[in-house]
Image (spheres, rainbow, N blue to C red):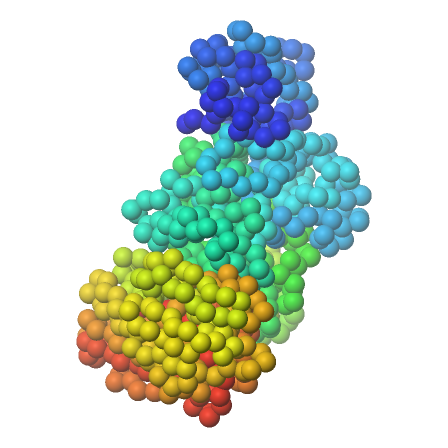
Amino acid sequence: MKFLSLSTCILLLFANAPVLCAAIWLPSIYGDNMVLQSEQGIAFRGTAMPREQVTVYILSTDGNVLVQAVTSADQDGDWALTLDAVPAGLNVTVEVRGSESDTVTYRNVLTGEVWLCSGQSNMRWTVAKANNSAEEIANANYSELRLFMVELSSASVPLGNLRGEWVLCSPETVGDFSGVGYYFGRDLHQELQRPVGLISSNWGGTPVQSWIPGSAMNTNASPRAAAELTAFQQYQNTPKDERKRDRHGDWIYGAKFQKAPTFLYNSMIHPLLPYAIRGVIWYQGESNDRLVAWGGPDLYRILFPMLVSSWRDAWGHDFPFLYVELANFKQPQTEPVEEESWANIREAQSSALSLSHTYTVPAIDVGEADNIHFGDKQTVGARLAMAALGQVYHQLDTSGLSPRYASYSVEGSAIRLAFDNVSSALHTDDGQPPRCFSIRGEGGEWLWGQAQIAGKEIVVSHPDVANPVAVRYAWASNPDVNVYDATNLPLMPFRTDVPDYEAMSESKVSSATLIYDDPISVPNDSGSVFLNSGTQVFGMNLGNGASGTVSINGVNFANGGRSGLTQTLAQNGITVTMTVDTAGSHQTQAAGGVSAGLYTNTSSPSDIFDLLNVGYLSGAGDGAIQLNFSGLEIGQTYRVQTFHIIGNGGQGSREMLYSVADVNQSIPFEQTYTGGRSYEDISNAVSQVFTFTADASTLTVDLLPKDKRAGIDRSYINGISVYVIPRS
């Protein structure tokens, strides 16, 4: 593994690069006050003179050599070696001696437990911003708890170094450190009575794509992951003044490309290699709930296990990986099942549990409805520490994990649920009956379930459900849960009707998204927007009474109507054809410049996204979007999800839903969701999911705005993507 060549080290390694490459040099993760992982091989790397012999010593306080290893630098000056394991609890000195260079010495070094703390903003959220910060900071005197905070940076290629330094935990240093990380490490230190080193490497608002190495994403094993790289490469090849921005006017991949695939792995994870760690704690996933921006739960289900496996491959062993399931957030649950909610991304997170030595802890009861950065980081850190103590260090009489759904059985008109990780009888923390359970009968709707605790099991029923088929628990963004086990860990959200994700693998998913093959010039009040050939366009604006012609796939669309736009995609035997016909006049407002929900006549035209689109359908016109499916397997059950962004101008546009106008098969809708006007976050958009069992090989669905059916003008659809997923 190459990290740094002798000829380029000064240019590439920031301000802390070696002044003279002839001297022995090591990355900044090695330094005074560091903690070396005990009870496993200790890896070092750096640079020296070409072919120079390098010896690393770990010395006791009296100068005796505890372990040592020797190697020679290669022709570029790079060297790496691994020393034998040492026990925990030692105070040592590390010396790195070159046969032709000065010695590098690191002092006040401890041996103990090293954990990497990574993710997005809830992992980065500092002790100073968390609950009870003044008292917590004042009491943070732990000389054997060491902190290393990686400075924010991004890079297009893997780097050999990063900025940061090891410091002792104290009231002067802890305030800016990760709250979750600190409370986790503090509890470990107190329970294990050994030194602990914490490496905090995280960046708020970042998707999981940013943290995965390119070698893992750019592989035939995952075409959808590789497509993420391709999309970014196209973005990079676009002139800067034509690149798309998000609704806040920021670059969609971040001002420093911190949201670009691989960029944070390259700059904030790869330079840590091969520093020995016991394991990783991870808190991330909020950003990936955004279907439009980062692929939503279905893509996260692929990428999150990929991240875990790729990091383990990079370090060369299957270290423990502990992650936090997303906290309760947004409006409190009001329906038995809230389909388009964070329940789906939580379930997607659990895809990593198929990997060995991977564990999850809940935050479903500590969040805040109106604050994604909830204050109670103490509870999250304590639960991570409990999981580590139970599963990694085997210091507990219990598993240290929350109860998780294991299986169910139908008993007459009730469903009995069994769980893993239940130390003794379940209970409710408020003495009330169990809440947040829903139940459904064959072909019926979800109803609030009547749940009863039966020791370590729970029985759910409803007087109107004679033949139950499924139960869900806390299937919402912000459920008010109250079921706990004897260790006061909450029951984690679940559903018994888990889709067959193997059948729903990317090789079996058909999707149709319009991709315009010709360059597009869209006239508007600010000029013209030019989009490159092959770009996926998310809506467009013909401006406030603007005149002109938009040509897409050879079809001209003048202000006042569009028709005949068709896109067909065939995959795995299923063909999906989408036709947009908006021959009727679309509405504009003379003063407001209604613009299909993307930008007003005063906004930057670069706000157009290159994500998803079928077209722009006005409720005032006579057009429709028609979906035609063929090649369906009779008897196969399919899940179809349509997703669209609503317009932001005109009456009724905030509350627009699809309606099925003409269906040649019976399709029961599971859920419709209405939200705000954001086109970046699915939680503020509109999605519909329906399932059907094919009794013919074809299916036709016409879609119109709800407000059009109600006779209300100024309602818009300006984006739709369709996914057809076989499921058993």
Q: Quadrant of residue 488?
A: bottom right
Q: Quadrant of residue 22?
A: top right
Residue pictured at 38% horizontal, 64% vertical: 520
Q: Is residue 676 left or right of residue 513?
A: right
Which one is in front, 123 or 459? 123
Which one is in front, 683 or 417? 683
Q: Position of residue 508 (x, y in %)?
A: 27, 61
Which one is in front, 521 or 659? 521
Tell how many labels: 0
Q: Is residue 85 left or right of residue 414?
A: right
Q: Quadrant of the C terminus?
A: bottom left
Residue pictured at 29% horizontal, 67% vertical: 553
Residue pictured at 47% horizontal, 27% vertical: 3
Q: Quadrant of the N terminus?
A: top left
Q: Is residue 30 left or right of residue 346?
A: right
The answer to whether 266 is drawn above or below residue 384 in the figure is above
Q: Position of residue 201 (x, y in %)?
A: 58, 41
Residue pictured at 56% horizontal, 19% vertical: 25
Identify the residue at the far bottom of this view: 711
Q: Is residue 354 something one can see in this rendering?
A: no
Q: Is residue 648 something one can see in this rendering?
A: yes
The answer to whether 55 is drawn above or below residue 608 in the figure is above
Q: Position of residue 632 (x, y in %)?
A: 21, 72
Q: Position of residue 95 (x, y in %)?
A: 60, 15
